[in-house]
Amino acid sequence: MITAATWRRGLHLGLCTTWNLAKVIVPVYLAVTFLKHTPVMNWVADFFAPLMHYFGLPGEASLVLVLGKILNLYAALGAITSLTLTGREITIIATMLLLSHSLPVESAVSARTGVSAALMTGFRIGISVLAGLVLNLVL
């Protein structure tokens, strides 16, 4: 049975979760939006554009991939919302991050289970790159 206490607890937990996510997403969104209005974003985009071309992505997408792979998916979400990307590009980025996100944390978890952290990280990055290349050709 749903009681008033259940509603209060659910509302409290929902607000706490929203606050925790906002603490990551909003600052990243603001930082990337700020960078878009400075020459820094153009330098990053121009530097990574040749590599991102293989995935069918603009150079700016490299920032999203780096944030997702090094920090977490919420940081990548904050960055991706501040960029103007097509559905195709978002699908490619999302798939690549699905396969290899939060690498430092996930590598530590792998190591605790007895699996080589370097091997798992390399495997996850390799599969992510392969998926990005294939999706660029298919989509």
Image: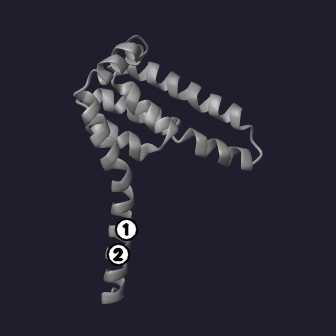
Q: Is residue 55 left or right of residue 37?
A: right
Q: Amino acid at mark 2?
A: His
Between 139 and 117, which is closer to the camera in this rendering?
A: 117
Vertical placement of residue 32 versus 58, above or below: below
The residue that disc 1 covers is 16
Q: Is residue 125 left or right of residue 132?
A: right
Q: Quadrant of residue 56?
A: top left
Q: Amino acid at mark 1?
A: Cys
Give the image location of residue 98, x and y in percent.
Answer: 47, 39
Residue occupying the point 38% across, 50% down: 24
Give the image location of residue 87, x and y in percent.
Answer: 26, 31
Q: Residue furthest right?
A: 114
Give the image location of residue 9, x and y in percent.
Answer: 37, 80
Q: Which mark is residue 12?
A: 2
Say which quadrant the C terminus sits in.
Answer: top left
SS class, disc 1: helix
Residue occupying the point 39% across, 14% down: 47
Between 131 and 58, which is closer to the camera in this rendering?
A: 58
Residue occupying the point 34% across, 17% down: 43
SS class, disc 2: helix
Say which quadrant the N terminus sits in.
Answer: bottom left
The answer to whether marks 2 and 1 mark residues whose Cβ atoms lie closer than 8 Å is yes
Give the image location of residue 90, x and y in percent.
Answer: 32, 32
- Can residue 115 be seen in this snapshot? yes
Residue occupying the point 29% across, 19% down: 42
The scheme the figure's colours follow is one colour
The 10 Å Cα crowd at callout 2, few under 14, some 14 to 19, many 20 or more, is few
Q: Which mark is residue 118?
A: none
